[in-house]
Amino acid sequence: MPKILFLGDIVGRPGRTCVIERLPALREALRADFVIANGENAAGGSGITGKIVQELLGAGVDGITLGDHVWDQKNFENEIDQLEGVCRPANLPEQNPGRTHLILEKDGFRLGLFTVLGRNYIGLKAGCPFERADKKLLELAGDCDACFVEAHMEATSEKVALGWYLDGRAVAVIGTHTHIPTADARVLPQGTAYLSDAGMCGPYASVIGRDVEQVVATFLDGMKRRFPVAREDVRISGCLIEIDASTGLSLGVERIEIAEEKDKGLNG
């Protein structure tokens, strides 16, 4: 049965270096047929560039998703249409550049993939994620054997609601954006794998990937500061989903976390 390895938000140079170096062995060990990664924080912690897209694809990522930081890097809006293997959130305004979905194929099995942004506590203008997910699933029905939906949302309630709404229609609804892995991985009653947040691929000795001292200082005095990407305790975080090829639904989902040990590299 096909397997999907999904990697949570890749944060800055520490996160992308870890993924690039470790993904080939991890993919082989887990026997993953498809690797999907959220790359919206891969460039300096905010946004992504065409060069980084190519580096991640070259390391074995099959599909790169994006979120509310999609346009943070200068000129990326002029690059995205030429970049295969990357899609922007499907519920952004239609005039935004970029693909709204991907179709990945392995051994004749076709996996559809798209992201929807939440509308609670997200600043970027976006349409209703529920309505857009309905439309995308109908659009992709004849072109893929299963469809993976990423819920890039701040509010856990919005993610959970979308999971229940799409149960039995998507192979998985996996949450991103908050960078903190959750403990609720499960297969919903009608066969959709669900996880509120896959966590991040990046430095966990941090405040969601950023330098602790600077973030704490801002919480204390309210002054604006630069929040550099942290460097320590780099981990790969995500989940592994097994697909029932006959139904296009999920047979199981489990969290994946690979932590760094000081002076010993990474171990699972």
Image: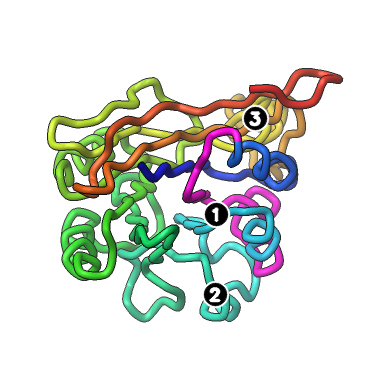
- Distance Cα–Cα, label 3 vs label 1: 17 Å
Q: Do the numbered discs 2 and 3 sit on residues whose CB atoms are within 8 Å? A: no
Mark 2 vs mark 3: which is more N-terminal? 2
Position of 81 with respect to 261 (left or right) is left
Q: Is residue 258 magenta?
A: no
- Distance Cα–Cα, label 2 vs label 1: 12 Å
The scheme the figure's colours follow is: rainbow
Q: Secondary structure at mark 2?
A: helix
| Residue 25 found in image quarter | top right
Q: How many marks?
A: 3
Q: Which residue occupies the extreme front position in the image?
A: 107
Q: Position of residue 206 (x, y in %)?
A: 66, 28
- For image coordinates 51% across by 79% down, the residue present is 81
Q: Is residue 106 above or below residue 120?
A: below
Q: Label 3, on which residue?
A: 235
Q: Is residue 189 above or below residue 9?
A: above
Q: Is residue 38 magenta?
A: yes
Q: Amino acid at mark 3?
A: Arg
Q: Label 2, on which residue?
A: 80
Mark 3 vs mark 1: which is more N-terminal? 1
Which quadrant of the figure contains the N terminus? top left
Q: Amino acid at mark 1?
A: Glu
Query: Start and end of the magenta stretch?
Result: 29-52
| Residue 257 found in image quarter | top right
Q: Label 1, on which residue?
A: 40
- For image coordinates 58% across by 28% down, the residue present is 219
For label 2, the crowd category at 10 Å Cα-Cα, with few meaning under 14, some 14 to 19 and many 20 or more, is: many
In front of the other: 230 or 61: 61
Q: Secondary structure at mark 1?
A: loop
In front of the other: 214 or 25: 25
For label 1, the crowd category at 10 Å Cα-Cα, with few meaning under 14, some 14 to 19 and many 20 or more, is: many
